[in-house]
Image (cartoon, helix red, strand yellow):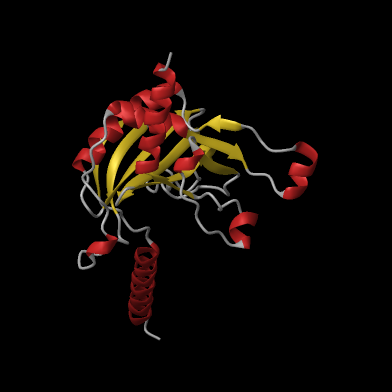
Amino acid sequence: MNPHRLSYYRSLITHHVSLLLLLLVAGCAIPHVPYRTVYEDPVKYVRLEEDDAVLPEWPPGHHTHPQTFTVDQMTRLLNGMMVKEHRIWIQKWFQGEAPLTPAFKEEEVELLAAQLTDAFAAARYNERVTFYLSEPQTSVKRVITTGGFYVRDSQLHVILGNWQIVYGIPLYGMIYDRRYPMRPTAAKGFDLHFQPSEAVIKQRSSIWDTIFANTKDELVIDMNRWQTSVTATAVQSSAP
């Protein structure tokens, strides 16, 4: 075959292979989640992210946003969120129940309370309030706590995607933890609780949810019950 023609066919094949690889990469690309920034610094943020599960043409599925909270209310809610190590029955047999631990540190509550209050006041019916907290350990590792909130009717939904998880930036450089704060970066080894417990609306769980520690993946708080409990506690505290 003519060397020039052979070179032409090689170039043509190379071009098509390159185009095919480009299309495959584009097809596998991680979708971008539209968001609006409420607060951001190099290691933390609070955002309003579009919820693709909310359909404009179906109002019953809309979030009840914007929503008014005071900083004091948000502080109480955050301080009421607790985390417990998930233990299966055989672990409980030998170790007993794991203790409850506050989900957020004091300085995290102080930051989040103000920023989440502003975020809910600006949120739209199709947006969720998300947060990302990190503590750098090395140039490629950090400890992260991430998640999100939304209100529907009188119920506050809370999803803790990661809690004090050590996240290592992969060699290929794709950073998932900041992009998807509501998604876990590793298997969840904890359950999310809330105090007062009477304000929690119990969710149905399958046997697989129990095995994989997803029984308390989404915490739902009845705001009316919570407010009643807060008021009752305040009355008891002020009684002589």
Q: Is residue 191 above or below residue 23?
A: above
Can residue 168 be seen at all in this image of the molecule?
no
Instruction: From the viewer's side, name the closer residue of 169 and 143.
Output: 143
**The quadrant where residue 26 appears:** bottom left
The residue drawn where x is 41% and y is 43% is 147
92 to the left or right of 118: right
**The quadrant where residue 71 appears:** top left
Instruction: From the viewer's side, name the closer residue of 27 and 149.
Output: 149
The percent coordinates of residue 163 (x first, y second) are 51, 38
Q: Residue furthest top?
A: 240
Instruction: From the viewer's side, name the closer residue of 135 and 151.
Output: 151
Can residue 192 be seen at all in this image of the molecule?
yes
Q: Is residue 146 above or below residue 4?
A: above
The percent coordinates of residue 223 (x first, y second) are 35, 42
| Quarter occupied by the N terminus | bottom left
The residue drawn where x is 52% and y is 42% is 192
| Quarter occupied by the C terminus | top left
